[in-house]
Amino acid sequence: MSNYQLFHNDLPTQASKSFKGEISIDTETLGLNIKRDRLCLIQLRNESNKKIYLIKFDDELSAKKSKNLKLIMENRSLRKIFHYARFDMAVLKENLNINVKNVFCTKIASKLTRTYSSKHGLKDLVKELLNVELDKNEQTSDWSRKKLSKLQVQYAMNDILYLEGLKIILETKLEDLKRIKTFNSIMKFLETRVELDLMGWENTDIFAHK
Ligand code: MN
């Protein structure tokens, strides 16, 4: 198992100042309903030194208790790599009033480049692009429990270990296909997409005729 450090509600200031360049991120929640299911865990990997941080949250989530995390997430000079950023960004906004800036979503990059496939899940991408079998068995476990199991920790870390590798490959594909400009525009629009989700338009195509 890779090394990691576990904290509660926030990163210590010293750790938060060590971030440079890119951060791989994932979140675990009680379920998939953002308004109902709270944030339980955030996994971060500082790609400049490969250090992994897990932040566990108690029932009483508040922006006040997570100030360093907010600073990092809203810092425009740090790039945040997610797989399906739309969900994680909405979770961070809803639970901690964090507006994530400078995002790279591997799922959107995959959809824009791997048009031959209908499979854009993390497991599918990691298998095809990096030839790694990802275990997704703990996905539906109880992330609110006081002490996470070894398997939960392993699963949580697995979800951020390959994001940087995927990003490098997908970025090349975006450039080869001349779709990087479109991709960057979509990344900028994500913040608005997330606002619409949280305002109740998550299942409506607001651009549709009807
Ligand atoms: Mn995950």
Image (tube, grey):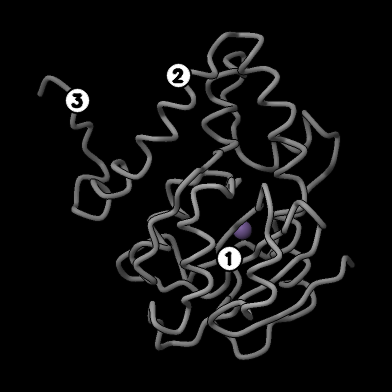
Who is closer to the viewer here, 71 or 188?
71
Query: What is the crowding at mark 1: few (fewer than 14 residues within 10 Å), some, or many (at least 20)?
Result: few
Q: Secondary structure at mark 3?
A: loop
> Which residue was labeled with disc 2?
182
Q: Quadrant of residue 140?
A: bottom right
Residue under the point 39% across and 71% down? 96
Check disc 3 and give the amino acid type. Answer: Phe
Task: Read off the residue under disc 1.
Answer: 140
Q: Amino acid at mark 2?
A: Thr
What residue do we see at 67% from left, 88% from top? 147
Report x, y in % for residue 58: 49, 87
Q: Nearer the viewer, mark 1 or mark 2?
A: 2
* Nearer to us in this view, 68 or 140: 68
Extreme residue toward the left, this view: 210
For mark 2, give the secondary structure: helix
The secondary element bearing badge 1 is classed as loop
Q: Earlier in the sequence, mark 2 or mark 3?
A: 2
The x and y percentages for residue 79 are: 59, 45
In this rendering, the answer to whether 119 lies above or below 26 is above
Question: Which of the 4 image quarters holds residue 91?
Answer: bottom left
Q: Disc 3 designates what residue?
A: 207
